[in-house]
Amino acid sequence: MLDAKTYSYATTDEGVLSRPYSPRTFSPASFVRVNGKIRAREVRVIGVDGKQLGVISLNDAINLARQNGVDLVEIAATATPPVCRLVDFGKYRYEMAKKEKDSKKHQHASMVKEVQLSPRIDPHDLGIKVTHAVDFLCEDMKVKVALKFRGREMAHTEVGFQVINKFLAEIVPYGNPDFPPKLIGRGIHVMVSPLPRNKRAKNPHQTETSPAPVSDNHQPAHSAPAKNKVPVSDAPQSAGLNNPFANLEVK
């Protein structure tokens, strides 16, 4: 009996149930045929020690797997005949999941950040744009530089190229353009890729904060100086001025 939580069916107009929907979460090992689910009559078997045992019948391969206390796992279904391996299926699933995790770890999802410029950009604003681009490149992101012309600015495209070249010259220690700046439509576009970490300069905007110096008396150097304490012996004897019995002599 099928579990209603695991399988869901779609009913057609004739009232016939169609094939179940595939689950959303799956792994490569979930589609692997094991033991009696293998459909081929003959299979090429790889032993427990990794050596090839040749092409044998499916029943003999299953019996061989039972003798070794492992499973017969189909690892190459498209081969002729299919290739099977004598291995514990739980161990095989763990190896497959580990390889898949490692492959995803090495995949680098490249992100692209866009920096927009203008032909009449202020030098201060250009410096801010350069700062943002350096931060993006130091985080292994690509930077798309776009300079847009407005109105009659198209008559002087050389000014835009000067701004773009100046921008690229500022970020040379951190990234290189993939192609020379191109005039596309009413703007100039260029893509900048980050340099490898061993060849890339450090981000100057990320400085490590050094701890405050400590003096010999274990007080921070920036702390306020302690107030001068008056010794008890040097303190004025002002307590006896308002005492009516101060000059009284006891005989």
Image: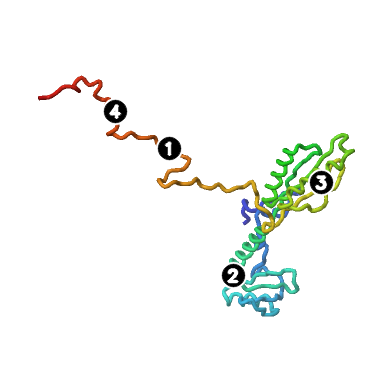
| Mark number displayed over residue 225 | 1
Looking at the rendered structure, the secondary structure element under dot 4 is: loop
Spatial distance from mark 3 to mark 1, Cα to Cα? Answer: 59 Å
Which label lies toward us, 1 or 2? 1
Residue at horizontal 18%, vertical 21%?
245
- The residue tagged 3 is 189
Q: Residue at x 61, y 54 (%)?
A: 3
Of residue 147 and residue 66, the one placed in the foreground of this image is 147
Q: Residue 62, located in which quarter of the rendered image?
A: bottom right
Seen from the viewer's position, the closer of residues 209 and 23 is: 209
**Which residue type carries mark 1?**
Pro
Q: CA distance from mark 4 to mark 3?
A: 82 Å
Q: Which residue is mark 4?
A: 236
Q: What's the residue type where badge 3 is placed?
A: His
Residue 190 image position (x, y, % from top left): 80, 48
Residue 214, horizontal then vertical, whole percent: 46, 46
Asked if disc 4 and disc 2 are in contact, CB closer than 8 Å, the reply is: no
Tell me how far mark 2 sits from mark 3, CA to CA. 56 Å
First in sequence: mark 4 vs mark 2: 2
Q: Callout 3 environment at 10 Å: few (<14), some (14 to 19), or many (20+)?
A: many
At mark 3, the secondary structure is strand
Asked if marks 3 and 1 touch (Cβ < 8 Å), the reply is no
Q: Earlier in the sequence, mark 1 or mark 2?
A: 2
CA gap, disc 1 to disc 2? Answer: 73 Å
- Residue mark closest to the camera, 4 vs 2: 4
Mark 4 vs mark 1, CA separation in Å: 24 Å
